[in-house]
Image (spheres, rainbow, N blue to C red):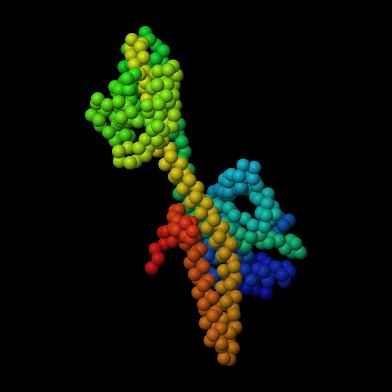
Amino acid sequence: MKYNDYYGKILNGSYTKKLKDRIIECIYAFKTYEACVNISISYIAAWHESNNNDIWYEFVSKRFLNLFDYSSQEIAKTFRDNVLYRSKYVFQDEDKKIEKEILTHDDLDAVREKLREETKKNGEVEAVYKIKIKNSELVWLKDHAIIETYDEDGICLSIGYLTIVTKEMEAEEKRRQAVNELEIAYKKLEETNQELEKAIELSNQMAIEAANAYMELNQLFNITADGMCVIDKNFNVSRINDPLLNLFGISVYDIFGKKCYEVISCGGLCNTTNCPLVRILKGESKVEIDIEKEREDKKKIPFILTVTAFHNPDGNLHGILANFKDLSFRKEAEQRRIHSERLQGVIEMAGAVCHELNQPMQSLLGYAELLGMIISREPNPNKDYIEKINRIKEQIKRMSDITKKLMRITKYETRDYVSGMKIVDIDKSSGFTPL
């Protein structure tokens, strides 16, 4: 028997009725869904269990063909030849982390048979492909499929659909690049600060070259990114650099005639035995503590305060050198990381929900259409039944709209829920504006 617009092998071959019925059922469902919403990139792939390298397509949607501009007979080889690499997220039980596995085009050729065996064992597949399509354009396609095995025929079916996730994957690549650049910049900053601390300690040890060391320290004092000040043994601020003035929101005139605890307080440490200056005067060489400073504009800034003894050129103890390392940037980076991880979790959950809902929705829509046709053909169609079927289809359309919004999520936005809880705002996260 021949079928119109069909280029597969199974329906025209010597296979069981069960397998053929399954192929017909899936093709009908995919075509019905495609005719309804026209967004499906669905497919049915097949291969012999005895030869994993011989794969063909029993069905591909129009959008699938349009991506590559090839015929149905050529699409299997075209897809395989144009895959640049395949990525998959794997959950590691031992450390509860998600690792990204990447296979290049050459890697895939070497392990293709092994991947199909693993897919057959798991019963499903979910992976992302970077593919060169027509006009040498590059796109990212996310593959969702279930695997069915028909032992009597020796055939495996992969029934699934592709989702274009180019924007999401490009955003992920940019995010990873930004994180790497941030880590490199932070490492360089740490190295610079370490060199600064070494220079300060060395200047205190070299009494003979105290004058030169003092000049070097003065230069570093003025160009460093950290806030720094020098406080004498009587708690007077004798030197303060511009970064510290800016951080605390004060001017150099604000410190004249005032003690350090009046303008540069260290929380509850001032006027106690835990005061960094008091500890240095008692013999400690270095004090390092975490503090939070509230400026006059009520803004709170977290710091790591590092205090070392500071000597005059003649070698006598002048007081302390206080280094205020602003941790706001680090905390903001941590908040951005947490926000990014939450967004990634929402995107992955949205993808999983869409994956789980799409097939049931397609089946419901197909059954509703079929039932409507059957009732319409009756001599006296029951209008009440027809109205209820239309309502079912409307609800399926609403569910389809929700899954579309889920697949367009690009940011993490929440809204208030019951009992003080917050939930993901799907409309804002997907950029959807309600009418």
The quarter of the rendered structure image containing the N terminus is: bottom right
What is the tally of numbered marks visible in this picture? Answer: 0
* Spot occupied by residue 371 in the image (x, y as percentages of width and height): 59, 80
Comparing 230 with 30, the one in front is 230
In the picture as drawn, the residue positioned furthest to the top comes out as 208
Residue drawn at the location 51% of the way across and 63% of the way down: 403
Comparing 354 with 141, the one in front is 354
* Spot occupied by residue 433 in the image (x, y as percentages of width and height): 39, 63
The quarter of the rendered structure image containing the C terminus is: bottom left
Report the side of 137 relative to 160 (left or right).
Answer: left
In terms of image quadrants, where is residue 317? top left
Can see residue 138?
no
Comparing 167 with 314, the one in front is 314
**Above or below for 213 versus 160:** above
Comparing 190 with 112, the one in front is 190
**Above or below for 268 versus 371:** above
Can see residue 22?
yes
Residue drawn at the location 38% of the way across and 33% of the way down: 267
Residue drawn at the location 51% of the way across and 54% of the way down: 346
In the picture as drawn, the residue positioned furthest to the right comes out as 152
